[in-house]
Image (cartoon, coloured by chain):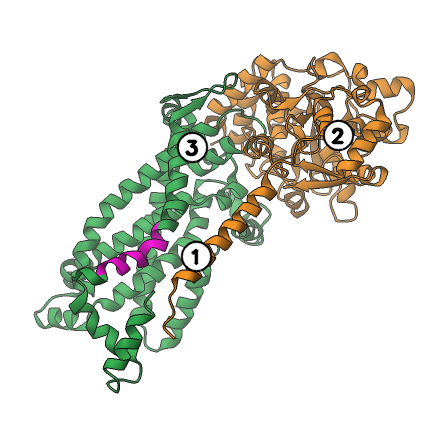
Chain colours: A green, B orange
Amino acid sequence: MTALPPTTAAAGRRGTAGRPGAANGAPAAPGTRGTRGRKAPGWLGALPLLVFAAIGFGLPVGALLYGAVTRDDPATGATALTGEHLQRSLQGPYLGSLVGSVQLSALTALIGTVLGVLIAQAVVTARGGALRTAVLTASGVLANFGGIPLAFAFVATLGISGVVTRLGRLDSLGWNLYSFTGLAVIYLYFLVPLMVLVILPALDGLRPQWREAAQNAGATAWQFWRHVGLPVLAPSLLGGFVLLFGSAFAAHATAAALVGGSVPLVTLKIADALSGNVLVGQENVALALSLDMIVIAGLVMAVYLPLQRRSSRWLH
Amino acid sequence: MPRKPLPRLVAAVALSTAALTALSACGAAPDKDPAADKAASAASAADFGGLDALVTAAEKEGTLNAIALPPDWANYGEVIKAFEAKYKVKVAVENPDASSSDEISAVKSRKGQKRAPDVLDLGISFARSGAAENLFAPYKVEAWDKIPESQKDKDGLYFNDYGGYVSIGCDAARIKNCPETFADLLKPEYKGKVALNGNPTKAGSAFGGVFAASLANKGSFGDIQPGIDFFGKLKKNGNFIPVESTPATIEKGETPISIDWDYLNAGYADQFKGKGVDWKVSVPSDGVYAQYYSQAINKDAPHPAAARLWMEFLYSAEGQNLWLKGYARPVLLPAMTADGTADKTFVSKLPEVSGTPTFPTSEELDKANADLAANWDKAVS
């Protein structure tokens, strides 16, 4: 596509730099961005992404929406519009599972945000790079450790006959892995490292000069955080919270392997309705539930986006 | 060096179009030929002109697409091997752990494709709904008359094949006194020990467990609520654990008591020999509940003759005895006991049950499903 311009440019300004594309392309770009000639290729460059988004996101969402609001008559095969599935997805146990998922995700995201920030701040203020490298590597691994392997790792350590449960006699203290609390602990296992990864750059962006300036003006550590640190970080914190919330909200395999139906979660309900041996004809309710999930995720994002825009001018 | 990109682009487009055409041709249905049409409409072996003609037609097709047949479930692994050894038909099992609703959606989404499943092994509610949706081909195996009336669709759209009773499995190496009835399960000594093999709104065996518990607690086929309340009580006194029991959790000691089909529990007993697990199986006398799975043939089966031959094999004495070997109770067991074709060594190994099983009607099943979906979460969370 751009095979022609670099060669001509290189010919025209030969000798200005070793790598013609890099040296000439960069300064030329700002000047020519607004002109008509460059506009079309720029848009074309985004085309693969747009096509991917349309196929990868647009089609499934369309199918989901269609299935959530229509019903096929089993006898005639005719399709009719109906609000029944959405209505059912917001009633009884289905509503209970939505509420349960939001509660679990909000709680674990909140705890994960706080713990993640504390760990990240400890890493930022620590001397020497070894701790930083170690924490970052570990976080990178642990943040992606999920699903059934994670569930079984916890069963082996903290389950009913788990090693730690037995050594610490945790069951007599009321510990039960197969509960809301147990699930929250497991979720934190991958949410906290995720938060560390997300918030470290933002903490790095807090300039030491700000703190020095605050100290020179007589501010205490608390006052610095209250009036400078946290306001600047707030959008990043909220962004991290939103990410954690989304992670927990969409998690399925760990919970499925661990608690089955005893902690009502919307992802488990969707799986039950979509692929089971007992309930017949629940597929459209599952789609309606998925739609509810998208709406909830959308609402959470809607809080985050405007704030994120405000913060970017401080940290970059 | 500056080459015009256009010819290359044209070539690429032309090539990919050709590739796409070829691909879609692969996925499309094979051309209709009269023999396939005849096989697809055959409602019995006689329509082929006898079993031998059916075998010839099936071997000409050479393949059978099966779905959701786990090799360690009711001895399916051996059933498949025996079928392949007897006939020149290869059995391709897709997604062995799929659920009934996965099977139905595979039938719907691959209608007319070569990859569509030929035969289905379904939970009873899915067999009924699939028949109502006109997805199955009617077929009557040679042993049709011996299948009890309550175990088959009168038109042959589906027919029950094998099943078993809800049973209580228990690791005698870890539990001093193994529970034998649902009433036993409430005893304080079983705190944190009792599991179901799945979520009853999803897994058929767990659903059966709740139904059996209901029968044990003055419930009926029309009223599953006492069973839900029973598990609520178990949960409240700390006996019920929501871990879905699998061979892995049993071996680990995580689920020392597991409510499951007797054929699965009995199979586990063999599997665990010498592994520190002493797995005992009892069918609770206070809640006797049996359920059978159904076979059906996809109406648009890409291998219609092989599908029908598979059915004939499953309902032959050989096929039925293979299920029996896997501790499942084949649907023809009463008839085979009468005419002496049932393998007595396998029969004697079945867990003991008193009385004959009865089965809920469609309406009762639907009501139980709905009640369970509405009330299960509340009871155990």
Instruction: Choose between B358 and B88: the one closer to the eye.
Output: B88
Q: State the residue in front, B284 or A275.
A: A275
**Dot in front, 1 or 3:** 1
**Mark sitting on residue B102:** none
Q: Is residue B45 above or below residue B92?
A: above
- Magenta segment's dominant SS is helix
Identify the residue at the far left of this view.
A217
Write down the region rendered in magenta: A39-50
Q: Residue furthest bottom?
A: A15
Drawn side of residue B77 relative to residue B103, left or right: right
Q: Chain of mark 3?
A: A
Q: Secondary structure at mark 3?
A: helix
Q: Residue at x 55, y 43 (%)?
A: B24
- Closer to the camera, A33 or B158? A33
Foreground residue among A277 and A162: A277
Q: Residue at point 54% right, 23% down?
A: B228
Quadrant of res B257: top right
Quadrant in the picture for the C terminus of chain A: bottom left
In the rendered view, does B262 fall on the left or right side of B102? right
| Residue located beneath label 2 in the image | B305
